[in-house]
Image (spheres, helix red, strand yellow):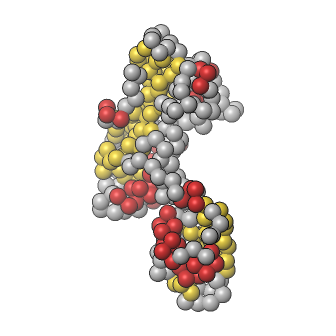
């Protein structure tokens, strides 16, 4: 029985070496299993200074190349809900990312990421490039670029605050009096701005639904700012505990519901709203 976690780093010494045959010999995994995990993104190939994922089972290796495998049975067994296409704009597409799906992969895999899902499911198929991120536990609207030119322009728009981003969250506490409350507290030594408004309050559960517009994108900005207001997000295991009024069975109640940015080709403002069926419900 092969180890459940291991790494392989092997320099190829013979031309015309088949990658599946070599990994079968080095790992004791079956050829069928090797082909499966290659599709899941845990096999890499270094040629000179360039290292990329290797998915093609019929790839013939050359002397001097280095083959890498990062095998973790627990990670490779993970499954997530499907993303849903909101709009295909050709040079980019906009998606609903569900709870649990990753924005980007690691050396261990990328099979549970939005970009890999889009690569496999979008028709017609095209390259996929990550523009921005949502935490694994955050659901909502994301944009994926389909060319290097598009990803450069969209990334620049996000970095230069030419975007609009609004979230909904379910929090513990009464936020009904908040109307466009501006939070301008530094996070990790950097300026961080959130504007928070209460939407609805459930007195029986002492919970509120809030809208948060962010002008910056610091790490866990919304979660930290709401926690600072003594309005921790339900299910937030980093900046809250169940003692604040939520169950350990509840997921993080934070969702991106609006995204706006200039079209990378026309420069016209594009706005995307989350369909209501995926919004958070207070009750």
Task: Tell me the residue at 46%/41% (across/down).
Answer: 99
- Outermost residue to the right: 189
Residue 247 in the image, given as x and y percentages of width and height: 54, 27
- In this view, the residue in front, 39 or 91, is 39
Res 42 visible: yes
Task: Tell me the residue at 54%/59% (across/down).
Answer: 76
- Compared to 180, does 76 lie above or below? below
Image-quadrant location for residue 7: bottom right
Image-quadrant location for residue 222: top right
Residue 15 in the image, given as x and y percentages of width and height: 59, 90
Image-quadrant location for residue 25: bottom right
Residue 96 in the image, given as x and y percentages of width and height: 38, 43
Task: Tell me the residue at 44%/33% (across/down).
Answer: 255
> Is the C terminus in the top left, top right, bottom left or bottom right quadrant?
top left
Task: Tell me the residue at 63%/86% (across/down).
Answer: 63
- Compared to 52, does 176 lie above or below? above
Query: 253 left or right of 89?
Result: right
- Outermost residue to the front: 1
Res 222 visible: no
- Outermost residue to the bottom: 15
């Amino acid at each position: 029985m092969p180890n459940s976690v291991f790494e392989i780093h092997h320099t190829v010494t013979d031309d015309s070496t088949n990658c599946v045959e070599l990994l079968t010999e080095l790992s004791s995994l079956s050829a069928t299993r090797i082909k499966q995990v290659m599709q899941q993104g845990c096999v890499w190939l270094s040629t000179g200074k360039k290292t990329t994922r290797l998915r093609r089972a019929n790839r013939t290796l050359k002397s001097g190349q280095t083959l890498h495998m990062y095998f973790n049975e627990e990670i490779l067994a993970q499954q997530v809900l499907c993303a849903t296409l909101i709009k295909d704009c050709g040079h980019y597409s906009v998606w609903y990312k569900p709870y649990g799906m990753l924005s980007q992969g690691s050396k261990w895999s990328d099979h549970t990421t939005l970009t890999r899902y889009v690569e496999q499911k979008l028709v017609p198929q095209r390259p996929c490039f990550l523009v921005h991120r949502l935490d694994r536990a955050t659901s909502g609207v994301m944009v994926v670029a389909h060319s290097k030119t598009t990803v450069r322009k969209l990334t620049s728009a996000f970095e230069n605050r030419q975007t609009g981003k609004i979230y909904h969250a379910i929090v513990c506490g009464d936020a009904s009096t908040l109307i466009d409350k501006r939070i301008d507290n530094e996070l990790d030594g950097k300026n961080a701005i959130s504007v928070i408004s209460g939407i609805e309050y459930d007195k029986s559960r002492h919970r509120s639904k809030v809208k948060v517009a962010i002008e910056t994108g610091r790490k866990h900005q919304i979660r930290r700012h709401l926690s600072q207001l003594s309005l921790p997000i339900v299910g937030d295991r980093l900046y809250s505990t169940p003692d604040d009024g939520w169950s350990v069975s509840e997921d993080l109640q934070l969702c991106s519901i609006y995204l706006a940015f200039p079209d990378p080709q026309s420069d016209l403002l594009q706005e995307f709203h989350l369909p209501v069926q995926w919004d958070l419900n207070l009750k």
